[in-house]
Amino acid sequence: MDILASSVWLRYLELCGEELTFPSNGYKGDYVWDIAATLHREHGDAYRVDAATVFAGLPPDALPDAQDGGDKEAHIDGVIAAAKHLLGDNRYRYVFELGLNTILDDIREDLAQFGVEYQEWYSERTLAESGAVTRAIERLREAGHVYERNGALWFRSSAFGDEKDRVVVRENGQSTYFASDIAYHMDKLERGFERVIDIWGADHHGYVPRVKAALQAMGDDVERLEVLLVQFAILYRGGEKAQMSTRSGEFVTLRQLRKEVGRDAARFFYVMRRCEQHLDFDLDLAKSESSDNPVYYVQYAHARVCSVLRQAAEKGMPVEPSPGVENLERLAESHELALQRTLARYPEVVEAAALKAEPHLLTHYLRELANELHTYYNAHQFLVADAALRDARIKLILAVREVLRNGLGLLGVSAPEAM
């Protein structure tokens, strides 16, 4: 966040007319320019500082054409320190908050459009401000699992299955990100949840044993914490992999993805794989109106049933089925028996998907059910002259429609009546 705040300020300085070499480790996306433009539009030159003053005495950056090399991490740290010093606490905090709130508001709106609304947003800063980090470290200390070495405070996590001990307070007295992690999970468990599910990127797999080690050291039940590791989604367009990098500003946003393929396809595709499996997201396939597109295939099955009911109404045939199980004994075709068996499995699939935290089970089931409906549709007539058989078949496809609509609803995907 400090890198973001400093990047916004440097772009603001450029808008003020200052000439500078932007740090290689700064954030370079267009969104940074947008936030900087807001700062400049609303405050003019009030935050302007001479660029030479900002970069005076800083460690050299590691630029591609630099002759003597450099250290990009030390350089951006220097930029951050200069921004805090030259702006002062209040003005720096304003730039920091502007960047933070602009992006958070954008994320909230984006997620809402995607059908995701969180009941609670949790700020890491509140952990320090509330004293939770200090309290977590004290709990570890009181349990005898913290020691000092080389001026730093260490948690003896190796005693609980971690590969090595971890620093919780640096030599300069600053608590580490890991210390915040400990405090956050301590707070989660103290809030009374029986089951806590964290969703992390797969590149954070090394954090699992150390977080669980801390909870165990504090006397908490580590079995209450489950960590699901999610692999990266790789986007393909025209058979080519889309290159993405956050800092360079090269990426496809969720908003762009939603606009390109639609909310339904984006949601369905994201849960088609186990979370620990890589997802190859074919943008062209997600937009296609063919049986190869899984979400289209499932939605089309629902729309087909609705179409049959419309045809029945147009022909003056009763579409309201008879009560109970009347006439169901007429469903003797192999396709009909297969559909009934698959329908009967639906409650088990939903339960398994929930208990195992594996929503992909539901997508596979819906595709299977849709395939059986399409096969049945192509092999048999539903609106037959035999009233009892017609009634039985209408009941069967209505059951299919109900399960398709229910399953798609659980995934947050629409069930259109016409396509």
Image (cartoon, grey):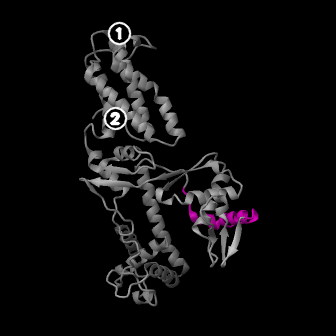
The 10 Å Cα crowd at callout 1, few under 14, some 14 to 19, many 20 or more, is some
Decide whether residue 126 is among the magenta residues.
yes
Residue placed farthest to the left in the image? 238
- Measuring 63% from the left and 54% from the top, which residue is drawn there? 188
Quarter occupied by residue 25: bottom left
Of residue 77 and residue 97, the one placed in the foreground of this image is: 77
Residue type at the position of mark 2: Val
For residue 388, which numbered disc appears in the image?
1
Q: Nearer the viewer, mark 1 or mark 2?
A: 2
Decide whether the magenta segment is chiefly helix, strand or loop: helix
Residue 306, visible in the rendered structure: no
SS class of the residue under badge 1?
helix
Quarter of the figure with the C terminus: top left
Rendered location of residue 68, percent (x, y)? 37, 88
State the residue in front, 253 or 102. 253
Q: What stretch is highlighted in magenta?
A: 121-144
The amino acid type found where label 1 is placed reads Ala
Residue 256, image quadrant: bottom left
Earlier sequence position, callout 1 versus callout 2: 2
Instruction: Give percent across and percent down for residue 169.
Output: 64, 72
| Contact? badges 1 and 2 (CB < 8 Å) | no
Check disc 2 and report the residue beneath it: 298
Above-or-below relation of 8 to 380: below
- Label 2 Cα neighbours within 10 Å, binned few <14 / some 14-19 / many ≥20: many
Q: Tell me where residue 112 appears, x and y as whole percent.
A: 43, 50
Q: In this view, does 367 lie above or below 207?
A: above
Q: Which of 295 and 49 is in front in this view?
A: 295
